[in-house]
Amino acid sequence: MRIRKCAWAFPHETIDKKAVWARKSVTCQRCPKSIATAESLTYLEQFGVWKQLGGQSLWEFDAKTADAVILLDHEWRKEGEKDEQ
């Protein structure tokens, strides 16, 4: 757990600049799994359902959820564009 600097095991430990996780242009200095909250996982699930249903109207969502879905869709598209290059 110390290798990935788990936020659960060591919540008050200072973070150095060394990355423990990276993917394309995103890096983390702490394990990203320990930072995920129940709320952020809910947004990911709602985004997945929205995508499976065709990604149509966002009017059924509250503003915060719609904003999260738009952000996740933007990142999804960027990821797809980089894979095509």
Image (spheres, helix red, strand yellow):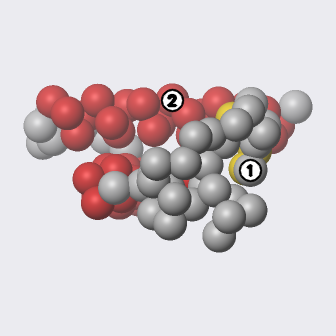
Q: Residue furthest right?
A: 85
Q: Position of residue 2 (x, y in %)?
A: 68, 64
Any part of residue 25 in sight: yes
Specify few, some or many for label 2: CA neighbours under 10 Å numbering under 14, 14-19, or 20 or more. few
Residue at image mark 2 = 74
Quadrant housing the N terminus = bottom right
| Residue at the image position 12 percent from the left and 37 percent from the top | 62
Q: Nearer the viewer, mark 1 or mark 2?
A: 1
User: Between marks 1 and 2, how big is the CA–CA gap?
Assistant: 25 Å
Judge left or right: residue 85 versus residue 61.
right
| Residue at the image position 29 percent from the left and 60 percent from the top | 38
Q: Position of residue 48 (x, y in %)?
A: 41, 57
Judge left or right: residue 23 versus residue 30.
right
N-terminal of the pair, mark 1 or mark 2, is: 1
Residue at image mark 1 = 20
Judge left or right: residue 74 versus residue 84.
left
Tell me the amino acid under the disc marked 1: Val
| Residue at the image position 74 percent from the left and 50 percent from the top | 20
| Residue at the image position 57 percent from the left and 60 percent from the top | 6
The secondary element bearing badge 1 is classed as loop
The secondary element bearing badge 2 is classed as helix
Q: Position of residue 44 (x, y in %)?
A: 39, 54
Between residue 24 and residue 71, name the one nearer to us.
24
Relative height, residue 59 to residue 44 (above, below) = above
Rendered image quadrant of residue 8: bottom left
Judge left or right: residue 76 versus residue 54.
right
Any part of residue 80 in sight: no
Q: Position of residue 34 (x, y in %)?
A: 49, 59
Tell me the amino acid under the disc marked 2: His
